[in-house]
Amino acid sequence: MENNITNIRYINTETSPSHLVNNLTTSDKFIYFIHNSETLPRIMVVDKNILKDSDSENYSKYVNKFNSNETNEMLVVKCVNLKGTYYMAVGLYGGFKLLSIDGSRLLFQIPTKVKTNDKPYAFTAITEYGDSSIISVDNYGQLFNISGSGVNWRSKLIYSKDGGTCTAVCSSPGTQHICVGYENGEVFIFKHINEAQTEVVAKLDSLTYLPCLSMAVMESEINILACCYLNGEVMLHNLSDFQLLSSFGAHIRMITNIIAYKDCFITCGDDCFVNIWKIDNQNNLKVIGNYELSDKMPIGVAINNENNGKVDLIVTMFDNTVLGLIENLII
């Protein structure tokens, strides 16, 4: 099924994302991205109603700035949905924080830890795990499981890989796997057995030895893990037997984000393109959407609400004050 595109619309938010990779997350009502170029790091919280009011010139009424009250740079913000409740999880140089969805209440934090060398400590990627916990990884190769509710939250170190910087993480609800990408291109697949036991069940090597920057799992008849790399390559693995299904160049240069939707993967890269890839029952891959955001570097992509079988894509652009809205797609 081919896409019919009617419009790419740009909406001014009067502030710009400042990270190169994975800098977009959404809840049912809000859009979030990180802005680090001022004195204090900030998370920009954008009301989705801005997408309906494109004729207005007063966009600031839709944008709130959540200040971290710290001077440390933020690295990742992730909206997580645990048992029907949204939370804001933030990784930064200086620790991990879990807050209410509007940032008004700090619920839990993992403070920075003193290390024996000069490498600053940072939480680098976050994902949901099932509907009851969060997995956060750091630049020392450690995995933490964060779980709880109300005012009772706790964290547990579930794995540590000496000398490895974690660069990406995602989970597969269908197989209960945790997938972690590293700076050297390795990908480790974990099985979280219980609170006291997490096992490495597979190690996937990259032929490029470049950082794995973004990951996503597509759930279908087989669960497919897509790993994206600095050179624009995507590697697809079957999570049942961990075999490589295919490897292909999705973008000319760095892939900045990937998401899974139905039987498709959606990627964006610093070549200014957002691409939609469809996988059939024989694991054949083809492009069904190819959209150029002229002179704008997309760094995050998310699905907006479905309407009459069509969806819109929300796109953030690096160092640019506009959101992109690719409208009326059939996927």
Image (cartoon, grey):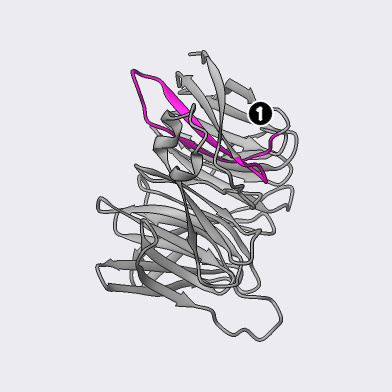
Q: Residue at x 38, y 45 (%)?
A: 27
**Image vertical order of residue 99 relative to residue 196, above or below:** above
**Residue at point 39% right, 33% down?**
220
Q: Position of residue 18 (x, y in %)?
A: 64, 52
Was residue 312 drawn as part of the magenta stretch in this picture? yes
Q: Residue 171, position in %: x, y?
A: 43, 51
- Please give the count of numbered marks on the rendered protein: 1
User: Foreground residue, 258 or 200?
Assistant: 258
Q: Is residue 113 above or below residue 138?
A: below
Q: Is residue 12 above or below residue 70?
A: above
Highlighted magenta segment, given as a residue range: 296-321
- Residue 161 visible somewhere in the drawing: yes
Classify the position of the C terminus by image quarter: top left
Q: Tell whether 201 sits left or right of 84.
A: right
Residue nearer the viewer, 183 or 205: 183
Residue 189 visible in image = no
Q: Quadrant of residue 127?
A: bottom left
Name the amino acid type tagged 1. Answer: Leu
Q: Position of residue 79 (x, y in %)?
A: 41, 52
Q: Nearer the viewer, residue 255 or 158?
A: 255
Residue carrying label 1: 293
